[in-house]
Image (spheres, helix red, strand yellow):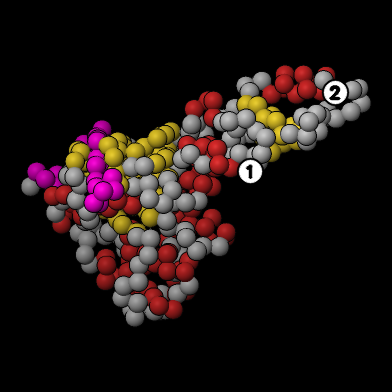
Amino acid sequence: MNATRRAPETRPVIDVRGLRRRYGTKQAVDGLDLRVERGEIFAVLGPNGAGKTTTVEILEGFRRRDAGEVTVLGQDPASGGRAWRSRLGVVLQDSRDQVELTVRELVHHFAGFYPSRRDPDEVIDAVGLREKESTRARQLSGGQRRRLDVALGIVGRPELLFLDEPTTGFDPQARRSFWGLVRSLRTEGTTILLTTHYLDEAAHLADRLAVVRDGRVVALDTPEALGGRHARRPVVRWTGPDGATRAERTAHPTRLVTELAASVPLGEEVPDLQVVRPSLEDVYLELIGAAAASAPAGAPVGTPVPARVTEEVAR
């Protein structure tokens, strides 16, 4: 009975310390620490093979760990029973089960598994599938199928919802609509753990995010503060007299631009002068070690990847 008792509100929903998991000679998860607070949207980012999927499967109770301490909703997932699982919602990256059933049949069927379920018809409306309720799952588009997956994940009114690459294959309009649905779930009190390869998705949805590399968390913060103050400093770029690209990260870009402008003959421009303000994508790429390989030719070591958002500086 104690194993399924609801945790006090002050406890984190997910608490992971020193998590390890090995496959043969491959150390997939190598001492990972993670803490997710109640009511937040938490995103996990990282390249393929970083250990994200293994970590999430351990949290969901689908995979055993080799070492470390893990609690999810106050329970060790390795021993979580039916009552504990009823408090979780899981939306897998790819789901193709029971494709001959209609949307309405599937949502009503899954609702029967949970003791505190939402109204199935309200869930169908919430995910925008009312017009498709009589359509078989195999006949849905990719975006519509993901909406159905979410409906099946939330119909049990979960305290914690796992979303694995939820908008893969969505068009831009469908993604924005889906983001609104996710935010509404958080407003209702659902804690959400999101894995995604879309940096704009993480920036729009996440209260905090973790970057995972080589089985460890290498950075954890809000999207605005990830990487620390240094990582967000502007980078001034220009072409030097020898034709080589120059770049300097500085907390005082205006001062550097003024100095550069004073170094050229009166009335002339500093060639290719830009102030680059690192985006979340730039910081992320630098954290996972992609910056050096992608730095522009002639730039000094440590120059960040060119930012997606740039601002040309007038003289």
Verify whether residue 17 appears in magenta: yes
Tell which of 278 and 237 is nearer to you. Answer: 237
Q: Residues within 10 Å of mark 1 (few under 14, many from 20)?
A: few
Which residue type does callout 1 highlight?
Arg
Residue 127 drawn in magenta: no
| Mark positioned earlier in the residue sequence (1 or 2) | 2
- Considering every residue shown, the one lying at the far right of the view is 267
Residue 12: x percent and y percent?
27, 36
Residue 110 quadrant: bottom left
Q: Position of residue 313 (x, y in %)?
A: 77, 31
Residue 173 sits in which quadrant?
bottom right
Kind of residue at badge 2: Val
* Tag in front: 1 or 2: 2
- Quadrant of the rendered image containing residue 308: top right
Q: As drawn, is 146 to the left or to the right of 116?
A: right
- The residue at which mark 2 appears reads as 264
Q: Which residue is mark 1?
A: 308
Q: Residue at x 36, y 37 (%)?
A: 217
Q: Residue furthest toward the front? A: 242
| First to last magenta residue range | 2-27
- Tell me residue 122's x, y (percent): 38, 64
> Quarter of the image containing the C terminus?
top right
| Residue 100, above or below 159 | below
Rendered view: 20 above or below 250: below
